Image (tube, grey):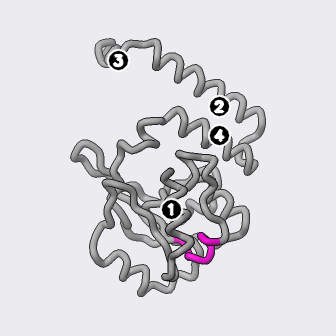
Amino acid sequence: GLYDAMNIATKIAKEDYVQFLNSGDTLVDSDTIAFVERGDFDGDLLYGDMIQVYEGRQMLQKASPDTIENFPKNITFSHQALFIRTTVMQELLYDTRYPICSDYEFFQRAYACGKRFRYMNRPICFFQLGGISYQKAFDLLDETYDIQRTYGVITEREYRSAKRNNHWKRISRRLIPAGWYARAK
């Protein structure tokens, strides 16, 4: 799987930081890595902004500095816009029990272990929407709720309610014919 491959690469990494881009994703420019190398960020996880790309349109997704104060409920960055200290990545690795949200679980675990997150006020990558997390949105939400419950981000009551709502949305999406919403407008 995707996260298995990232873990294998992590084990042989030699530089100070690792960063993973998925198929279709690219760095914003050729200076991005040099920017990180030049910077004195003093962080275990360095995160920045990303530009989401979908059907030819682009939208800047800001990962504001207050993300960490609102962490762990409100994560506004993805692993594509993140540089992780190699020693931290080698210590924690991705938990492959989560085929879609292993990066989210990694962020939660790193935060719980006291790892230092630092914001870089800069777009890092072009993030191509339409991948597995986009295609399997209901599965993504189920994994997210499982992780949030594990790390105490949501209560057991909130967890059951969220899972139940996601279940009914999944069923209604299967029952309502494709294009019905567009015709109903």
Identify residue for label 2.
Answer: 162
Element type where label 1 sits in the image: helix
Residue ID at (38%, 67%): 124
How many residues crowd mark 1 within 10 Å: few (<14), some (14–19), many (20+)?
some
Q: Quadrant of residue 180?
A: top left
How far apart are the alpha carbons under marks 3 and 2?
A: 24 Å
Residue type beneath disc 1: Met
Residue type beneath disc 4: Tyr
How many residues crowd mark 3 within 10 Å: few (<14), some (14–19), many (20+)?
few
Q: Quadrant of residue 159?
A: top right
* Nearer mark to the viewer, of 3 and 2: 3
CB contact under 8 Å: marks 3 and 1: no
User: Within the magenta stretch, is there residue 164?
Assistant: no
Residue type beneath disc 3: Ala
Q: Which residues are magenta?
A: 84-90
Residue type beneath disc 2: Ala
Element type where label 2 sits in the image: helix
Viewer-side residue, 57 vs 102: 102
Question: Counting residues from the N terminus, which is met first, the one under dot 1 or under dot 2?
Answer: 1
Identify residue for label 4.
Answer: 145
Viewer-side residue, 99 vs 104: 99
Identify residue for label 3.
Answer: 178
How far apart are the alpha carbons under marks 1 and 4?
A: 23 Å
Q: Is residue 119 visible?
A: no
Left or right of residue 123, residue 143 in this image = right
Element type where label 4 sits in the image: helix
Question: Counting residues from the N terminus, which is met first, the one under dot 3 or under dot 4?
Answer: 4
